[in-house]
Structure formats: structure tokens, C-alpha cells
Image: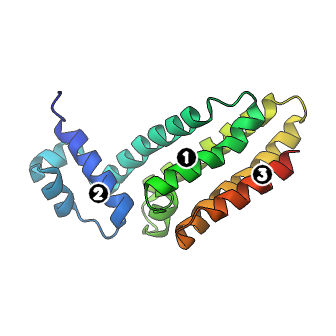
């Protein structure tokens, strides 16, 4: 088994702490202690807590999009993949006890001057939006304009169902959003 390097330990530890405890509630000293690294070693890899959060969000984006694509890969149509994303949301949110979206969570906990983190959240949400648009554009039944308009409606269903599931600690908002998605795509 390969030993995990200092940088990776910092990112893994910070990722868990930021996601489950919150950005403002997680301090540099806690990250250093739980990652079992020296302060000097941490500063060799990251200049600030904000830089660690950016690394967390980059890694989370790759993981999240990979699992989303894996979950919907069994669907035969592009529209089926879009609708199937709600199955991914159900699976994922149950696994994390409805903790919610890492990007939504960090943004609500973010000081105004942390633009690098905000940029990562915008990048992720725009990539999800583009993913939906591209799938719907592949469908022969929609024009490009219709695909983008419907895609934005689906994105709102996704985002709303995530936050409401977090608040309710239940998957019913995702089920309702999936049902609404099917209606708007038919």
C-alpha cells in the first residue's frame, strides 16, 4: 500500500472537516493536527486555508462528476442520463446522511473576500449546467435553445432538491424533483 503524502493528507483531512464541520468552523491547527503534519510542511504546500479549500473543491468536483457519470452510465439515452442524475443524488445524499452539497455549504459559510473559493463553486455549478445542456442537445427532440432552457430548469430542480433534502433530512424532495424533471422533458 502506497503511503499517502503530506499534501494528500492535508487535502483529505480538510475535505472531511470542511464538508462535515464547515469552513469557518475548521481551523488550520485542527487540519494540521488531524492530518498529522508539521505546520511548516503544511505551508510548503498551501499558503492559506483558502488555498486548501480550493484544493478540496477541485478534488470534490472531479469525484462528484465521476460518480455522477458512473451512476448514469447504464442509461441508454441522454434524457435518461439527465433524469438518472436524481438517482445519483438519492444515493449520494443518503451516504452522507443528507449533509448536502459541499459547494452550497461552503458558500453559505464564506467570508466575502474569499473569491478563489467562490470561483470554484461557480465553476462546479457551471460544469453541471453544461453537462445537462450537452446531454439535452444530443436529444433530437430539442433545439439548442430548448435544450439550454430545459437544462436550466433541471439544474434548478437539482439544486433545490439538494438543499431541501438537507433541510428535511429526507429524500422526498429528490423524488419530487425527479418526477417534475420527467414532466418537463416530455
Q: Secondary structure at mark 1?
A: helix
Q: On the rendered structure, is 147 left or right of 115?
A: right
Q: CA distance from mark 2 to mark 3?
A: 38 Å
Q: Quadrant of residue 174?
A: bottom right
The residue sitting at 63% across, 58% down in the picture is 159
Q: Is residue 23 visible?
A: no
Residue at which label 3 appears? 181
Residue at which label 2 appears? 49
Q: Secondary structure at mark 2?
A: helix
- Placement of 182 over or under 109, stated as above or below: above
The numbered mark, 1 or 2, whose residue comes first in the sequence reads 2
The answer to which of 88 and 37 lies nearer the viewer is 88
Residue at which label 1 appears? 124
Q: CA distance from mark 1 to mark 2?
A: 20 Å
The answer to which of 103 and 74 lies nearer the viewer is 74
State which quarter of the image contains the C terminus: top right
Residue 116's spot in the image, x, y percent?
A: 44, 52
Amino acid at each position: 500500500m502506497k503511503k499517502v503524502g503530506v499534501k494528500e493528507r492535508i487535502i483529505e483531512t480538510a475535505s472531511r472537516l470542511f464538508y462535515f464541520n464547515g469552513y469557518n468552523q475548521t481551523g488550520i491547527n485542527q487540519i494540521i493536527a488531524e492530518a498529522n503534519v508539521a505546520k511548516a510542511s503544511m505551508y510548503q504546500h498551501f499558503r492559506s486555508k483558502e488555498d486548501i479549500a480550493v484544493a478540496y473543491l477541485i478534488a470534490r468536483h472531479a469525484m462528484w462528476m465521476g460518480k455522477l457519470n458512473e451512476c448514469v452510465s447504464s442509461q441508454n439515452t441522454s434524457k435518461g442520463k439527465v433524469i438518472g442524475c436524481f438517482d445519483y443524488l438519492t444515493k449520494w445524499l443518503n451516504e452522507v446522511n443528507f449533509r448536502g452539497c459541499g459547494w452550497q455549504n461552503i458558500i453559505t459559510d464564506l467570508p466575502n473576500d474569499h473569491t478563489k473559493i467562490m470561483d470554484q463553486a461557480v465553476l462546479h455549478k457551471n460544469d453541471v449546467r453544461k453537462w445537462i445542456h450537452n446531454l439535452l442537445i444530443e436529444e433530437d427532440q430539442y433545439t439548442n435553445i430548448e435544450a439550454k432552457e430545459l437544462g436550466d430548469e433541471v439544474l434548478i430542480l437539482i439544486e433545490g432538491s439538494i438543499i431541501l433534502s438537507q433541510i428535511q433530512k429526507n429524500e422526498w424532495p429528490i423524488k419530487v424533483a425527479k418526477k417534475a424533471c420527467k414532466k418537463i422533458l416530455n
